[in-house]
Every structure is written in C-alpha cells, then in structure tokens.
Amino acid sequence: MSEVTRRGFIGGTAALGGGVVAAGIAEPAAARAGAAGAAGAAPPLGPVVVRPADPRYGDLAVRRTNQRFRHEPEYFHLVGSTEQVVKAVGDAVRANRRVTVRSGGHCYENFVGEGAQVVIDLCEMSEVYFDEERGAFAVEAGATLMQTYRKLYLGWGVTIPGGQCGGVAAGGHIAGGGYGPLSRRDGLTVDYLHAVEVVVVDRSGRARAVVATRNPADPNHDLWWAHTGGGGGNFGVVTRYWMRDPGARGNDPGRLLPKPPATVLSGTAVWSWNGMDRESFRRLLRNHGEWHERNSAPGGPYATLWGSLLIPGRQAGDDPGGMLLPAQMDAGVPGAEKLMGDFFAAVAEGVTPEVFVTPFERYPWFQAARTLSLGEEAESGRYKGKSAYLRARFTEEQADVAYDHLGTPGDVSSSGLLWLLSYGGAVNAVAPSATATAERSSILKVLHLSTWDASRDGAAHLEWIRRFHRQTFAGTGGVPVPGGNLGGAYINYPDADHADPRWNTSGVPWSTIYYGDNYPRLQRVKARWDPRDVFRHALAIRPPARP
C-alpha cells in the first residue's frame, strides 16, 4: 500500500464510513437564523457552479478519499444553504440531469460518480450550533466529525458517539448509523437523532425541504426513521441534522447530549508475525473474540473500553510487521489501568510470540479525539473495503482463512488488512426496529481491506480481497448472512459485490445483509418520499414491487 495509506490505516483506528452520498434535509427559518442567517453574520457561500473549463473543476474532481474513482459530472454545484440545495435539485430534475450528492467524500463505492451529471457538494454547509427553538444541536451535512466534536465540546462540554475518522462528514456518517469509540458506552450516533432536514422531490418533480422528527405523531416521522441507518443517497439531500438525547429533559444545552470522559487512557498491544504460527494466530483471534463475548453487554466496568485489532499482511524481509491492538477507555473508571491491563492479558494469553504493551498514556478527551483519530490526508488512497458484523467470535475455520491470506508475504497480500473493532454494549440496548439500523446483537465489526497506489495493479488487489471475504464466509454463500455468529454488514461500508451473484451465492439479497427485517419499511419510505427514484446508486433502496 502507499505510504500515506499505510500510515493512515495501520497507524489509526478509524471508522471510515459513508460520508460521500449524504441525503439532505432543510432547515426552518429559526434554525437558519441560528447559523449563517443570524444578524451580522456573513451570508452563506454559493451557489457556485463549476464546469470542466473552470480551473476549480480539477480540485473538485479529486475531492474524495477513495482515489479509485474520479467524479467528472457536467458540473459541480457547491451550495451554502438549504434554499440553494432546493434550487440545485429542482434545476437538475427539470433538466433531466442525473444528480448525486456528497458531503465528506468517503464512500467505499462510486455512488457519487456513477453516471452523475450533476454533483451537489455540501462541503461548505458545515455549521454546528445550538438551535434554541428545537432545543437540540444542529449539525449541517458538510460538517466533519472533528469540526462537530470540537464545537460541541468546547462550546457546551458534550459530544456525539461518532467515528474516529475526523475528515468524515456528518451527511453520510449519521444517515448510515454512525459509531465510534464511545458507542459501547453511549450507543450509535443515530440513537441521538432528534430531527433531520431533507430536500426531497415529489412525483411532479418539485423539490422542497422537509423536516422530519423523532416524534411519532409527526406526519414526516417515517422519513426521520429512514435516516437512522437507512444510508445516504436514498431519499433526498440531507442538509441538516438535529441531535439530542431522547431521555434528556429541560433546555440546558450542557445536559442534552452525552458528556465525554474527562480523560482518556490509551495503550497498544503488539505481536510480531515472527513466531506467529497458525495455532497461535487462532488463539489470538479466539481470545479476542471470547473477551468481547464476555464483556459486550450494556453497562459494566468495560463499557467504556474500545479497541481495534489490526492485522496487516505479513511483510517480506527481516521485519515482517505484526498485529496491533490499540485500545482506549475512560481514565476515570475505578481501576482503569488494571482493567486495560487485564484486557490485554486476556487477549495475549497463550499466544506466541510474547505480547509487547506500550506504556499507558492519559489524554484530555478532546486531545485524545484529535491524537487518536485519522485525518483526511491519512484516509486518502486506493482501497476496497468489505464489512461484516460478528455476533460471536470467528470460528477456527474463519481464522484459518485470515491466516492463509495474511500470514505469507506477497505482492498483494502484504497490503491487505483484517480489522476487528469493538462493538456492542449500549448499541445492543436498542430494539432492532426502533431505528433503521437493524443489527443490534453484534459484539465486533469486521473490515476486510486492500489498499494500493497508482503504480500497482488494482485488479489483482480487488481479486484478492474478494476471495478473502468470500472464503471467510464460505459457509453462507460468500457473504455475512445474518444468523449464527454473523450479523450482516454495515451500510456505511458499502460493498456492491454483495449484490453481485458472482460473489454472493447465498440466495439472500443484499438488502437483507444490510437492513435485515427493516428493509420493507425502508422501501415504503422510498416510495413515498422519492417516487421518481431521483436518488439512487448501486445499493440504493428500491421501492416495493407493485402487486
């Protein structure tokens, strides 16, 4: 893999995901007054239309993290307000132009570029503020996670349980579910979604802004529900989210979202590939998985511990590299250092070679959020990712597949990666039907990843990662069909191969893998709010078949 990509994926523990294809939502006048529309504030940027002859076009064409794809529409439409989004969408629909949307540009697949004639870019819609009228925090779709964390924390001492990729934007991250290091304690990002603003297109082709809320009596409630894990690019253009703890009372902003730990304790366990034979590798994955089986119920002393086991492909030469297990937890938990030490010891028990554990460090929370995250540059490169949820540890047969693909140096395998991220806890305290995020039983997330630079043969890397994923889930048709130790896949890590019968031979549709029993309801929302199928891509929600 390229040096930039290797530093990013191996040196951090990000939750890449889905920021590219955000759906959008519109704000009321009072909300606009709270942001750029306030008296004395600068007017919003835009609208700006950039066509191929414009020197800015080249920069916009490469404004994405997955360099496998290039976005080359007839024009980019940069917008700075909901009203501008309404007009941009309306103009494109009237001209019969295929329109797509991006916020952070982090999509694993080419959902923004595929067939797009108009790309609406939300990067300049990045305000984060407290909306007194709604009693909730407004986060515009173009705001990055790091911008959001900084503003919420420095302004009010609160945060949302989002991902570690600081450059990912709220637009796609929240619509797809959103999770990160605080999710075992606090749940998913969408568990705090209070309302959402979306620019939708009706059957006549008219674009308009709609606000949908958590309130079950809201006639637009189904649109709110669809954005609690239904994924971006399906229903409209999300322009703004409002975030608030559903259990919060009163209007004190400092009490309306979770407060992060005052201090974070972090450390990393390291094992070398030297001496890591097949049985020891099995033991490592078994120990890691069994620890999560024992410690992933909501609450408990390990509710704040989050780790990510990174297993990169073995390198050729005297330094083959090895496995990393960075972990962090609330340093204020009684006995935090012992708890983290016991965690590393449990994962390392009986594993050879011997584990090396770095000295533990303590960081103020926001410093930890910045230091332990991936920046936008580190995330950039050519890559293919394929995900799964685990309800229980990998079987030994699945561990053997990983060993066979990663344990021998090779031109392609050496730039591959297996990533196991802590999950469960408070995530699993929510009913599967309460949000569009159906999977509420898993303890780990899995990411199979292959990266390469422009000088390498991307086709070989794609073939390798596809075989790795297919063989891991050979018992269920090459894909993580929900059931047994599997819980499906994460829509913010979309993989179009799951809809391809060459790679999915399970007979189970991709929609079940990503949405489980929630898919029929999502289809009904699609039929109501996007009857012309304006917003679509390779894994788009399809309206229900007519009888």
Image (cartoon, rainbow, N blue to C red):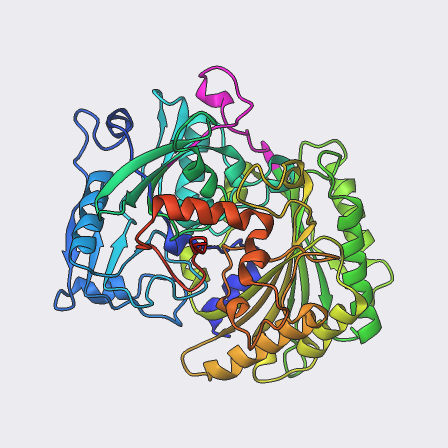
Against 431, residue 39 (above or below) is above
* Residue at x-position 52% and y-position 49%: 520
* Residue at x-position 64% and y-position 63%: 480
Residue extending farthest front: 547
**Closest to the observer, 530 or 254:** 530
| Residue 280 shown left or right of residue 134 in the figure | right
Against 234, residue 539 (above or below) is below
| Residue 358 shown left or right of residue 79 in the figure | right
Asked if residue 246 lies in the magenta stretch, the reply is yes
Task: Point out residue 405 in the picture as x, y percentages from the top left corner.
Answer: 67, 77
Residue extending farthest right: 350
The magenta region covers: 241-263
User: Residue 10: in sight, yes or no?
Assistant: yes
Task: Point out residue 411 in the picture as x, y percentages from the top left corner.
Answer: 57, 84
| Residue 260 shown left or right of residue 88 in the figure | right
* Residue at x-position 27% and y-position 31%: 35
Against 160, residue 217 (above or below) is above
Residue extending farthest top: 250
